Structures are given as structure tokens and as C-alpha cells.
Amino acid sequence: MAIIVEDGTNVAGANSYVSRADYIAYGAARGTTIEDSEKADQNLINAMDYLNVQCVKGEVVFITQPLPFPRWKLVDGDDEGPWTIPANIKLAQMQLALDVRNGIVLLPSRSAEPQVKREKVGPIETEFFAPAGYAPDIPLAAALLAPFQCGQGFKLKTYRV
């Protein structure tokens, strides 16, 4: 699948915020060689899948846009353009793609069936437990995404009386 980059103008069929070349350069700057192949595109698409399910602040600019960004009203008073993709969102996608390349599963399919913890048949014992929620360990991408995610901190306006 070819990468079609969203640039903030509601690009038809967009499926990424960065190009394969951007991703390869990102990896190289961090000492990682990323093959210039379809696998790099797949990593970017997997990263985009993760970004697509995140709750982000603001509202989409175009009702028909295929990706969560560009957005407006990300911060108070942000009611005008220009509509761009924030740099940290692009960095987060590339970092998530790098995490996928390194074996991290961002959106695992997990069964809701109870898991065996311990089993006992005669002298053998079995104990089940409900599976815990899974959150991948992605500290850099999480830090880059935090300012844009719903529920990150809160603001109180105080008034002196």
C-alpha cells in the first residue's frame, strides 16, 4: 500500500502524516537503519491505526477528512487556521512506527476469555483470572501525544473576590 501524506488540506485517501523518506530519516537520526521497502510503509500504517483510535482534543477541520488531524480548538481560543499537522503528532507517528519495527504490538487483539493462572485436577490445581487491559510500553510516543489527548490535566479559572 502506498503512503499518501496528509498535509492539512484534507488530502483524499491520506493514510499517514509523514512519508517513508521522513520515517527513514527519523530512524537514521536515532541510529536505526530502516529498509526503504513496503515494510516501512506497513509500520507507518500500523502507527497510524494506533493514532486513529486515540481520543484527541478539538474538532476535525473537514467533516470528510480520513485522519484525526488537522484539528481546531486544540487549545482555548484556537478558532482559526492555518490547519497543519502538529510536529509532535508527526514525531509520534514515526516513533510508533519504530516501536512496531522493534516488535511492540500497539493494538493487540485479546480474548476476553478467562486466562489460566493455576489448575488442579486431582493433585493438579487450576485457577483462572480475567485478562488485564493491555497498554504497550511506549513512553516517548506517549509523551509526544499527551498534550493532544483528551483528559490530560485540567484547568481551573480562579477569580479573586
Image (tube, rainbow, N blue to C red):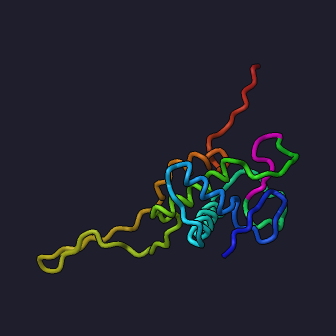
Q: Residue at x 83, y 68 (%)?
A: 64
Q: Residue at x 63, y 59 (%)?
A: 54
Question: In this orientation, which residue lies closer to the viewer: 137 or 111?
Answer: 137
Residue 74 located left or right of residue 137: right
Instruction: Look at 69% across and 73% down and name the residue there.
Output: 2
Magenta residues, dominant SS class:
loop
Residue 107: say if magenta: no
User: In the picture, residue 18 is in which quadrant?
Assistant: bottom right
Extreme left residue here?
123
The range drawn in magenta is 69-77
Q: Position of residue 55 (x, y in %)?
A: 65, 57
- Numbered marks: total: 0
Q: Position of residue 106 (x, y in %)?
A: 52, 63
- Residue 10 at x, y = what percent? 83, 63
Instruction: Work out which residue is located at the far bottom of the displayed protein and give it.
Output: 121
Residue 73 belongs to the span the image colors magenta: yes
Instruction: Tell whether 65 sits left or right of 28.
Output: right
- Seen at 81% across and 50% down, the residue is 72
Quadrant (top left/top right/bottom left/bottom right) for the N terminus: bottom right
Q: Quadrant of residue 153?
A: top right
Asked if residue 124 lies left or right of residue 101, the reply is left
Query: For this rendering, which residue is in front, 26 or 67?
Result: 26
Residue 127 horizontal side relative to residue 47, left or right:
left
Figure check: 14 above or below 156: below
The answer to which of 75 and 160 lies nearer the viewer is 75
Q: Residue furthest right?
A: 80
For the C terminus, which image quadrant? top right
Q: Is residue 21 above or below residue 121?
A: above
> Which residue of the protein is positioned furthest toward the top in this rendering?
161
